[in-house]
Image: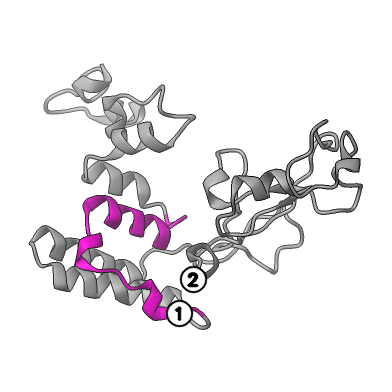
Amino acid sequence: MIRGIARPFRPYGIVIMRGIPKWPATVPAGVDPSLAGKPKFTLGDTACYMPGVDVTDAKIAATRYLLMPPRKYNIQMGPYMKKYIDTRRPDMNAPSVRPVIVWTLGETYLIAAEAAYYLGDAPDAVKYINVVRERAAYPTGNAAAMDIQASNLSQDFILDERSRELCGQMTRWWDLVRTHQLLVRVKAHNSDGRANIVPRDTLRPIPQAQMQSVTSGPAYGPMGDPLWN
């Protein structure tokens, strides 16, 4: 079962590319040699396909359109999130009027699982996580194949599971800060942010207007916290 299908992402997409790419002078294995130097596709053909499952590099090279398995997703290209799509919008640029998600039962299970893990209760942690993962397989997936074991448990796994379940629900910054993983994760996974993130980014600065509104008692520092000075 591909998590992105049951959860908030579509595993495929079409993109507009500048210029139609051509086959190299020496075509990859499995490609008709007579296609060397010719356009890979024509106007109206598929330009990009995201299958949602991994494929080999050889398969990617031999495909005439851009074939992007999950390991090839990047900041610029990847499946779009459909969790908040409002089918009643008059056009794609109109805002969604769907309710904002404040709390879900899935998050309740994940909080219980995380608490159990930190208390050393692996059986309960596994049980609560598997409830969420089996639900993600509904209605056509293999629920049993979604189950994890105690050996899978770690802080990283729990954070990964929260990212899959709660994607788009505005909880990620808080999750990474409270677990002291914001700097670690951004440097490991965010190619755009890793060069600029610093320890003060684990804090939210106090708005200047709020500081100026304090008329009695101790004054705020220049930015409210030494890391922001």
**Label 2 sits on what residue type?**
Met
Locate residue 115 relative to residue 71 in the image: left or right.
left
Front position in the image: 97 or 81:
81
Q: What span is in magenta?
A: 141-169
Mark with earlier residue (2, 1): 2
Q: Secondary structure at mark 2?
A: loop
Q: Which residue corresponds to mark 2?
A: 1
Q: CA distance from mark 2 to mark 1?
A: 6 Å
Q: Is residue 72 left or right of residue 93?
A: left
Q: Position of residue 162 (x, y in %)?
A: 34, 58
Look at mark 1 in the image and give the residue it sits on.
142
Quarter placement of the C terminus: top left
Judge by depth and name the residue closer to the eye, 59 or 124. Answer: 59
At x 37%, y 79%, the residue is: 144
Residue 153 vs 28, above or below: the answer is below
Residue at horizontal 49%, vertical 78%? 141
